[in-house]
Image: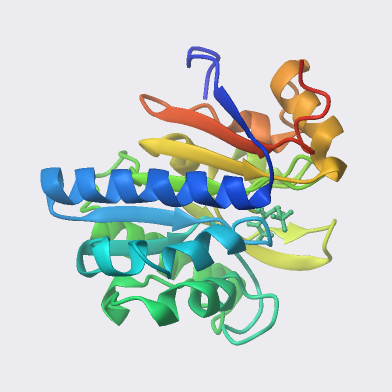
């Protein structure tokens, strides 16, 4: 995750609905391209609230009928350590907004198994990735699309400021205790996030404007702003932000 990657593209959308449309259009274009080229499309979902509108849009016309759901494989960038049917589950959010409404095979939905102990859930998810991507030792999975959100504290996925998970460079998945939320999280590690082919941050709301400015225009201090860690290795990076979040960006 060195400083060699190009400056990220920042696209400012008028409002959250326009942001959702951008995500759906990017997803659709990539899904079609990847299925045509490699027969499948792998996407790692962001959790939280911001992506909900995009997921819901993908469950409607024309995406519902036209996207290659049979060849689409869904993963998560991170998960809260709660049961899959818990109101705070990222899996449940994606299932209710999108997965329950499209023709995606259950075997293509690679949920993080939070019914296991945290460390076991991480190990099982890591094995899922190694199997799906048929990874030789020492190589990283490369999601075709990685959607990420950003918290007002600069965290992304479940990589929180000051957390040891920020320094993980060997494992694909870890299960850190997160002081800021007083709970375990299961998260992809920085190398995995940085090896995605196309990384798209989706950020909305005035409450994130200061942090977004710091992340994009401030000094490189990923301990404080983990979102700065995400510098794709041979991948693209796009920030889709609404006007409110972009308030402080020139
Ligand atoms: C999670 C997410 C997390 C999220 C940010 C932003 O599990 O909460 O993966 O990284 O993307 O916290 O969340 P909002 O979109 O709700 O602001």
Residue at image point 35% right, 36% down: 197
Residue at image point 23% right, 62% down: 68
x, y percent for residue 188: 52, 52
x, y percent for residue 104: 29, 74
Ligand 1 sits in quadrant: bottom right
Residue at image point 13% right, 47% down: 36
| Color scheme of the displayed model | rainbow
x, y percent for residue 15: 69, 45
90, above or below 157, in the image: below
138, above or below 250, in the image: below
Q: How many marks can you see?
A: 0
x, y percent for residue 206: 84, 41
123 with respect to 36 (left or right): right
Answer yes or no: is residue 151 visible.
Answer: yes
> In terms of image quadrants, where is residue 66?
bottom left
User: Between residues 170 and 106, which one lies in front from this camera angle?
Assistant: 106
Residue at image point 52% right, 71% down: 94
User: Between residues 161 and 30, which one lies in front from this camera angle?
Assistant: 30
181 with respect to 39 (left or right): right
User: Between residues 143 and 113, which one lies in front from this camera angle?
Assistant: 143
């Amino acid at each position: 995750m060195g400083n060699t990657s190009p400056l990220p593209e920042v696209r400012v959308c008028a409002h959250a609905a326009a942001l959702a449309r951008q995500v759906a259009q990017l997803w659709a274009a990539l899904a079609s391209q990847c299925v045509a080229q490699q027969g499948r499309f792998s996407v790692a979902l962001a959790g939280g609230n911001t992506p909900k509108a995009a997921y819901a849009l993908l469950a409607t016309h024309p995406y519902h009928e036209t996207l290659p759901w049979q060849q689409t494989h869904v993963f998560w960038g991170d998960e809260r350590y709660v049961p899959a049917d818990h109101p705070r589950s990222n899996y449940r959010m994606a299932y209710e907004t999108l997965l329950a409404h499209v023709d995606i095979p259950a075997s293509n939905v690679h949920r993080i198994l939070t019914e296991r102990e945290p460390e076991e859930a991480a190990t099982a998810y890591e094995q899922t990735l190694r199997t799906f991507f048929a990874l030789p030792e020492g190589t990283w999975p490369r999601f075709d699309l990685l959607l990420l959100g950003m918290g007002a504290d600069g965290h992304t996925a479940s990589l929180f400021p000051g957390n040891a998970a920020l320094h993980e460079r060997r494992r694909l998945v870890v299960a850190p205790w997160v002081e800021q939320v007083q709970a375990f999280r299961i998260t992809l590690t920085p190398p995995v996030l940085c090896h995605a082919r196309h990384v798209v941050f989706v950020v909305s709301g005035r409450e994130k404007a200061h942090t977004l400015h710091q992340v994009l225009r401030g000094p490189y201090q990923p301990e404080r702003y983990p979102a700065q860690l995400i510098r794709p290795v041979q991948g693209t990076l796009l920030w889709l932000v609404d006007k409110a979040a972009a308030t402080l960006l020139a």
